[in-house]
Image (spheres, rainbow, N blue to C red):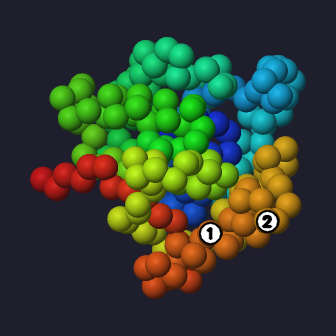
Amino acid sequence: MRVLVLSAHMDDEILGMGGTIARHVEAGDEITVCIACKRAYNHQFDPKVVEEEKEAARRAVKVLGYQHLQFLDLRDELLDERLLDVIVPLEECVMKVRPDVVYTHHRGDSNQDHRAVFQASIIACRTIGVHKVPRLLSYEVPSSTEQAPPFPEYAFLPNFYVDISGVLDRKIQAMKAYTRELREFPHPRSAKGIEVLAQKRGMEIGFQAAEAFVVIRDQWQ
């Protein structure tokens, strides 16, 4: 399969579905991860820090072993100001990759960039586009998805699970490449936090460890 992972920030791809990426690698699938934003810290852009984070993303690629990493270099924290600036490059990525399955952010995340990538993904992956994406799913990002307010429209209600019992250690190792983003437990972005969430999602479906998704569209021809 051709797999496309759409992420707002460097580290979202690992936090949300690093184990599933590893499973796709094991299956022999061709994987492209497209990261929308160059990262800002304390609302400031530092070119040196952005390059350091890109290098962290490349180290994570080596841990997981997937093929293609693309940076769009859009402005962090501002994706929701002009959605067209997100839609156009995502459409180009979809047309280039022509994926069989696309993974994107959850619509109810507390982070505005995550929500913008979700909205742009829905348009870029529409069934009347240049390339019809047969399968579209959204993933959760620890420290963002669970931080949304307690209203029904924000809820992450998974209906698809991937067994990552055999690759959880690889997911955690990939996240450790992002030294600037890793935190101490009980922060959700800690190594232990990632493990605990994987175990919780696993218990929901009868696995030792799992990643959870919402299936937005699944077409079988």
In the image, is residue 60 above or below residue 172? above
- In the rendered image, residue 92, in percent from the top left (x then y), is placed at 41, 22
**Image-based side of 197 in relation to 137, left or right:** right
Q: Using the image, tell me which numbered label, if any, was put on residue 25.
A: none
- From the viewer's perspective, is 186 left or right of 107? right
Residue 172 seen from this side? no
Q: Earlier in the sequence, mark 1 or mark 2?
A: 2
Q: Nearer the viewer, residue 110 or 2?
A: 110
Residue 178 visible in the displayed image: yes
**Residue corresponding to mark 1:** 197
Q: State the residue at coordinates (68%, 45%).
A: 11
Instruction: Tell me how far mark 1 sits from mark 2, CA to CA.
Output: 11 Å
Q: Specify few, some or many for label 2: CA neighbours under 10 Å numbering under 14, 14-19, or 20 or more.
A: few
Q: Quadrant of residue 215?
A: bottom left
Residue at the disc numbered 2: 186
Location of residue 53 by image quarter: top right
59 to the left or right of 80: right
Seen from the viewer's position, the closer of residues 77 and 64 is: 77
Q: Amino acid at mark 1?
A: Leu
